[in-house]
Amino acid sequence: MSESVTKPKRILAIASGGGHWVQLLRMRPAWDGCVPIYVTTQKGYREQVFADARESHQPTPRFYTVLDANRWQKVRLVRQLLQITWILLRERPDFVISTGAAPGFFALKIARRLGARTIWIDSIANAEQLSLSGRKAGPTADLWLTQWSHLAGSIDPERGRPHYEGAVV
């Protein structure tokens, strides 16, 4: 009798730089045993990711950078969308997780179409209302979380509601 070998799940963790990235990396233990693929807008984060993998005796993860863009930079957004699409087609993750902003929005939208499970965690910086990216991506995510209890359940019930399970930071 042969034992079946389960391949480790591939998880693509994507976020803009700064606070979004910090919050995303705080969740790293949640994907221990998975094959991590990191995507961000800051090339300087590469060494941090590799050093953390060495320190925890994990394999060297895949790391990509994409163009930074926001809603007022339409051409840059299109270029970012194309970069993220290429990464997703190349890597074919089982799961995509993001804390925002634009790169996470695009990744979740495309990943869902490719059959990946998706998780959106709205940034803790959005204490008064959900982020624009969260309001757009959250309702289509398999799991949509907010880090503020008073924002849980907000948004139209027809479009979905964020859940509160605690804060990352």
Image: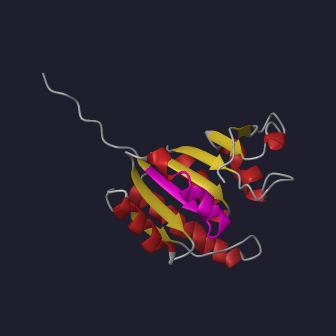
Residue 10 placed where, x, y %?
A: 40, 49
Residue 47 position by quadrant: bottom left
Residue ranking furthest to the top: 1
Q: Where the C terminus falls, by quadrant?
A: bottom right
Report the front residue among 23 and 142: 23
Q: In the picture provided, is 110 more to the left or to the right than 93?
A: right
Residue depicted at 78% across the width and 56% down the height: 131
Q: What colour scheme does the image use?
A: secondary structure
Residue depicted at 71% across the width and 75% down the height: 74
Residue 114 within the magenta-colored segment of the rendering:
no
Task: Say if residue 78 shows up in the picture.
Answer: yes
Residue 69 position by quadrant: bottom right
Residue 11 placed where, x, y %?
A: 45, 50
Residue 86 placed where, x, y %?
A: 47, 65
Q: Which residues are magenta?
A: 11-27
Q: In the picture provided, is 50 more to the left or to the right than 119?
A: left
Q: In the picture provided, is 52 more to the left or to the right than 7?
A: right
Residue 49 placed where, x, y %?
A: 44, 66
